[in-house]
Image (tube, helix red, strand yellow):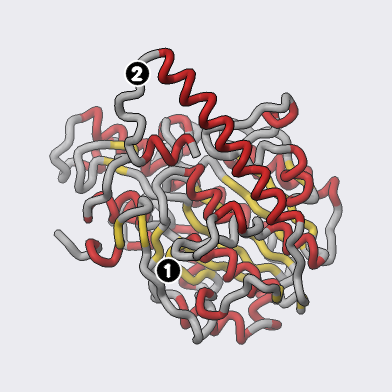
């Protein structure tokens, strides 16, 4: 709630200590009310049936990932060679026309976890969080984040920066079977920690693993070990940028290249399982491309902002055994790769992969089905992405 208000500039003049105090009290009250409604909606949710179509499903959420800095999507520098090789080998299918509703992680997370979608009559808190449906079906649901930690939760604090529904002990225990309590400096170390915990938990018959990386989150230079440096300012002599700006771009591209190693190592973990992995970024990032800034701009999106901050990479990988047992699903994925999509509908795709049916499943919102119908893709809560996408 707090970030949503800031995003829409309702607090542009919020400067005095009194104003800050009043807003803090207001945001805490609003967040508390929203959370209690979310709990009621989620805890009462039930499923009708489950076919266990995919025994092992993995959702990987990337961070601050500019699609146009990925060579998988045509970037001139080889930032994602391992993903490209898996695509060439027929394991990985990249989606070409995906956008995120927000360029801020907290808003994205609520949309990704909730069955609510823009345009619904009911408000977001009145729809359940989708992991509860997997648990109702008997899936083991594991959540691990290299950003959202459990430390604040254990102290009984609510994170007003946006993961308040994940920082509530009751909600967290209901949504997830297991949750790793801390993170690491680099994602590869984080992945090793995840593997260690998975071994301790044991292998369940049906699993949903949700993995949230720190990815290319600012500060880019801190997102990859120095020995993984591939790009330097000399790789950007064709760009009209200062040396400092070129170094920033190099750090970002190195973080993207390192992320490619992380993702490839993660896929290796599931190669021997009947597994399907969905990767999606939370949002993009400005890296001195069309706009001479880095980071993100929190005002009404223009076409350049939409391209750099709202267009995101998304792909689906499947293991060899999965592809052999589910050729129909693979065909569905291939047929859907160029359809327009916005990620607040991602839970429908995940429910489909599990074969879960409930009152909220909607074939017209399921990207993998022929019945899928693209809806208006509203970004930043106010702009129709498709109405500005091609403006140059």
Alpha-carbon neighbours of circle 2 within 10 Å: few (<14), some, or many (≥20)? few
The number of callouts visible is 2
Please report whichever mark, 2 or 1, sits nearer to the chain's N-terminal start. 2
| Res 342 → quadrant | bottom left
Residue 258 seen in this snapshot:
no
Q: Quadrant of the C terminus?
A: bottom left
**Residue 300 position within the rendered picture, expressed as x and y whole percent measured from the top left:** 27, 47
What's the residue at 29%, 54% (across, down)? 306
Residue 63 seen in this snapshot:
yes
Measure how far apart labels 2 and 1 are at the Cα level: 39 Å
What's the residue at 63%, 70% (across, down)? 360
Q: Which mark is residue 34?
A: none
Q: Is residue 119 above or below residue 353?
A: above
Q: Is residue 367 above or below residue 99?
A: below
Mark 1 — residue?
Answer: 341
| Res 276 → quadrant | bottom right
Mark 2 — residue?
Answer: 15
**Front one among 211 and 45:** 45
**Residue 301 position within the rendered picture, expressed as x and y whole percent measured from the top left:** 27, 50
What's the residue at 58%, 32% (across, down)? 29
Q: Is residue 371 left or right of residue 272?
A: left
Q: Point out the residue furthest to the top here.
A: 17
What's the residue at 55%, 50% (across, down)? 110
- Find numbered disc 2 in the image and state the secondary structure of the residue it sits on: loop
Alpha-carbon neighbours of circle 1 within 10 Å: few (<14), some, or many (≥20)? many
- Find numbered disc 1 in the image and state the secondary structure of the residue it sits on: strand
**Residue 49 position within the rendered picture, expressed as x and y whole percent measured from the top left:** 77, 77
Q: Is residue 353 left or right of residue 245?
A: right
Q: Nearer the viewer, mark 2 or mark 1?
A: 2
**Residue 243 position within the rendered picture, expressed as x and y whole percent measured from the top left:** 21, 29
């Amino acid at each position: 709630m707090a970030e949503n208000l800031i995003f829409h500039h309702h607090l542009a003049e919020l400067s005095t200590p009194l104003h800050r105090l009043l807003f803090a009290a207001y945001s805490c009250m609003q967040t508390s009310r929203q959370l209690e409604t979310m709990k009621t909606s989620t805890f009462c949710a039930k499923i009708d049936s489950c076919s266990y179509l995919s025994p092992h499903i993995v959702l990987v959420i990337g961070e601050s990932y500019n699609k146009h800095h990925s060579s998988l999507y045509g970037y001139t520098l080889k930032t994602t060679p391992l993903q490209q090789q898996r695509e060439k080998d027929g394991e990985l299918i990249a989606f070409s026309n995906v956008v995120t509703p927000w360029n801020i992680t907290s808003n994205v997370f609520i949309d990704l976890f909730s069955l609510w979608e823009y345009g619904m009559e009911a408000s977001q808190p009145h729809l359940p969080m989708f992991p509860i449906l997997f648990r109702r079906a008997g899936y083991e649901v594991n959540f691990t984040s290299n950003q959202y930690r459990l430390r604040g939760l254990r102290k009984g604090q609510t994170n007003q920066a946006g993961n308040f529904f994940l920082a509530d002990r009751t909600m967290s225990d209901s949504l997830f079977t297991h949750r790793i309590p801390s993170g690491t400096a680099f994602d590869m170390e984080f992945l090793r920690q995840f593997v260690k915990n998975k071994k301790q938990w044991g292998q369940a018959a049906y699993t949903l693993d949700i993995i949230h990386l720190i990815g290319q989150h600012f500060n880019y230079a801190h997102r990859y070990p120095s020995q993984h440096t591939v790009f330097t300012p000399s790789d950007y002599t064709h760009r009209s940028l200062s040396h400092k700006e070129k170094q920033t771009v190099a750090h970002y591209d190195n973080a993207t290249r390192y992320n490619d190693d992380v993702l490839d190592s993660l896929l290796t973990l599931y190669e021997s399982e009947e597994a399907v992995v969905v990767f999606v970024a939370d949002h993009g990032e400005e890296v001195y491309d069309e706009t001479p800034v880095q980071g993100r701009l929190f005002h009404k999106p223009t076409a350049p902002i939409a391209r750099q901050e709202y267009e995101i990479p998304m792909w689906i990988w499947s293991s060899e055994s999965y592809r052999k047992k589910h050729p129909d699903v693979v065909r569905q994925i291939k047929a859907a790769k160029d359809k327009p999509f916005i990620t607040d509908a991602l839970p429908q795709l995940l429910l489909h992969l599990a074969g879960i049916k409930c009152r909220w499943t909607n074939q017209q919102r399921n990207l993998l089905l022929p019945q899928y119908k693209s809806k208006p893709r509203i970004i930043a809560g106010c702009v129709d992405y498709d109405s500005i996408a091609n403006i140059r």
